[in-house]
Image (cartoon, helix red, strand yellow):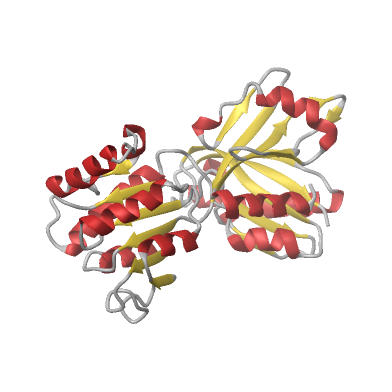
Amino acid sequence: MKKIFYSNLVNALNEKGEINVVTVISGIYDGKDIVGQKLLKSENDIIIEDESLKDFWNSMLKTLDFTKGTCVVKLENNIELFIEYVVGKPHLVICGGGHIALPLCNIAKMLDFNVTIIDDRIEFANNERFPIADKVFCNDFNEAIEDIKPNKSTYFVIITRGHKDDRKCLEKILQNDFFYVGMIGSKSKVAFVINNMLESGYTKEQIDKVHTPIGLSLGGQTPAEIAVSIAGEIILEKNKKESSNIEDNILNEIRNRKESMVLTTIIEKHGSSPRGVGAKMLVYENGEFIGTVGGGSVENAVYEQALDLVKCKKSLVEKYDLSNSAASKLGMACGGTIKVLFEFIDI
């Protein structure tokens, strides 16, 4: 595995907000063990790590279903693939800096979202009002949304002060990529905006993408309660499809560190384990590491295996039984099994 592959992954994530990473976890092709070989698939592009495997990947792509999210796929001829649906860090854009925006910003930061606030009134869009927001735009809504460059990991919440700005935001958002868009308002206010947009030529398919009235039906009355219902709906939508997130520090180290390393990834989980599918730990040739696949004796075993593999420059898949770990016997874990991909990454 060459570092350039991960540079391509980062570029695709920054542009699109999502990407499918396909890794061979078991298989022989043309007499050669191809465990660890990878392919990137975005909406319109495919990038193959090793061009000599182009025919292999072309045959695989005809059979793969990318709508299921992160999963392991078993194919003929003992070929197993790990499809990892990788999304960028979720970015919540709150259009409107009023009373609901304040608790919603705080909740979103707790949920590890990047948060941007947009309002065209300086008293509602300033860093003193939103000290923990990542960005605050006091600008025309259309211009601010354009500057954000939304993609498939962008979530929009429209909570402006009136019909005109609601529609302005929604029209601009529907012209871009996004993961989620929701608009607050009474049934009459929402109907007014939607009907006007339909009369202006927007399709029912476009309008159906809008969550409105926004939020889960929790009966919220206060700004904080309404913010909770909005955040709840966002979480619900976000987690409908199994996905993975690769920490920025791991991606940066893979691309920039001048030594060989092994990236370990949990690709299957059965029963209880501290970390889920997609969790990663990066182990360097000098013995340092970042990330985690769960801690304890199992993580130590993964770490030791990674150190061996970085010396022999090899990739493989290993299964670990957590029920036999010391932590489990002490009642600290419920037990279960994980399968880990060890991926050697060369300088």
In percent of the image, x 61 and y 52: which residue is there? Answer: 280
Give coordinates of residue 128: x percent, y percent: 33, 82
State how many labels appear: 0
Residue occupying the far bottom of the picture: 128
Would residue 221 appear left or right of 332 to someone viewing this image? Answer: left
* Quadrant location of the C terminus in the rendered image: bottom right
Residue occupying the far top of the picture: 76
Residue occupying the far front of the picture: 200
> In the figure, residue 52 lies in which quadrant?
top right
Would residue 304 appear left or right of 298 to someone viewing this image? Answer: right
In percent of the image, x 80 and y 53: which residue is there? Answer: 310
In percent of the image, x 34 and y 55: which residue is there? Answer: 169
Give coordinates of residue 126: x percent, y percent: 35, 78
- Front position in the image: 331 or 17: 17
Up/down of 306 relative to 207, above or below: below
**Whether residue 114 can be seen here:** no
- Front position in the image: 166 or 230: 166
In percent of the image, x 64 and y 54: which residue is there? Answer: 10
Would residue 304 appear left or right of 95 to someone viewing this image? Answer: right
Give coordinates of residue 260: x percent, y percent: 81, 58
**Whether residue 190 can be seen here:** yes
- Front position in the image: 84 or 194: 194
Give coordinates of residue 337: x percent, y percent: 55, 38
